[in-house]
Amino acid sequence: MIDLQKLLVVDLLAEREAFGGKGVEEIVKHFPNHEVLLWAPHTDEARDYGFGIRIQEPTDADVVVITGSRRNVSMWEHWMDDVAKLVRDCEVPLYGICFGHQIICKALGGEVIRASESSTMMAEVTYSDGTSSMQLFTHQDHVVDAGEMKVIGSADHCEIAVCKHPNRPIRTVQFHPEAVKSLLDYSVECGDLSVEERTAFGNQEQDLDVTDSLIRPKF
């Protein structure tokens, strides 16, 4: 019997039905043959997704993903110290989405500030190799200094939108590649998004999913 590799999801939307449960479900689809470990250090009210194993503290894993969050790196909370330590100590592939992008950059010497208004939109991301993609953003904090991370993608409203580490297996995106159309539609059904918020994204599909933007990107 072959042991499964372990995927640790730092599940920072664990209290939400759509962007939490359905979002994590979309993420883990891109890691077949992995045992899924779910760590939600910010809440004692994590949902039962019907998959994955809830853990109370981070453990050894073969890959780590840090999700988005309703919390803010610019408004630091004590549990974020544990996530930042995980980032600094991590020796396996590490991927950050939205809040994950921000806290990874912050933990590695960068800076995150809060804008006066939130950004909820589909926007074009331009990469350092000259290619571009349309992606879904919903955030108010912005990375303004990437620290150790190298900036490889920008949007008009977000200069530091995609990063990779120069010598560690770390990649991050400010956008939400897991937010496929079915997740957005379900978000309205369950109340995670208002009709107005859903309308802001339109019906355009994102160009890059979790695999193409983080796990095996072309850039």
Image: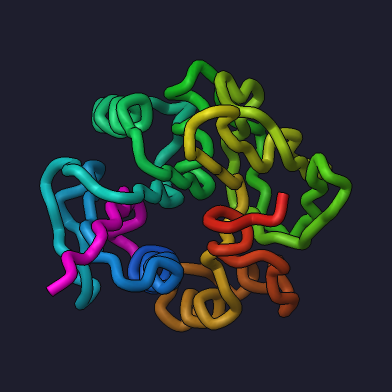
Q: Is residue 120 left or right of residue 20?
A: right
Q: Is residue 63 above or below residue 150?
A: below
Asked whether 43 falls inside the magenta stretch, the response is no
Q: Is residue 67 above or below residue 154?
A: below
Q: Is residue 31 above or below residue 126?
A: below
Of residues 109 and 70, the one drawn nearer to the viewer in this rendering: 109
Residue that appears at 31% across and 48% down? 10
State the image coordinates of residue 154 (x, y, percent, origin top left): 76, 41
User: Is residue 162 in sight in this rendering?
Assistant: yes
State the image coordinates of residue 45 (x, y, percent, origin top left): 17, 56
Residue that appears at 58% across and 62% down? 177
The magenta segment: 1-16
State the image coordinates of residue 99 (x, y, percent, origin top left): 48, 42
Q: Is residue 190 left or right of residue 85?
A: right
State the image coordinates of residue 112 (x, y, percent, origin top left): 56, 25
**The quadrant where residue 160 appears:** top right
Of residues 115 and 212, the one drawn nearer to the viewer in this rendering: 212
SS majority, magenta? loop
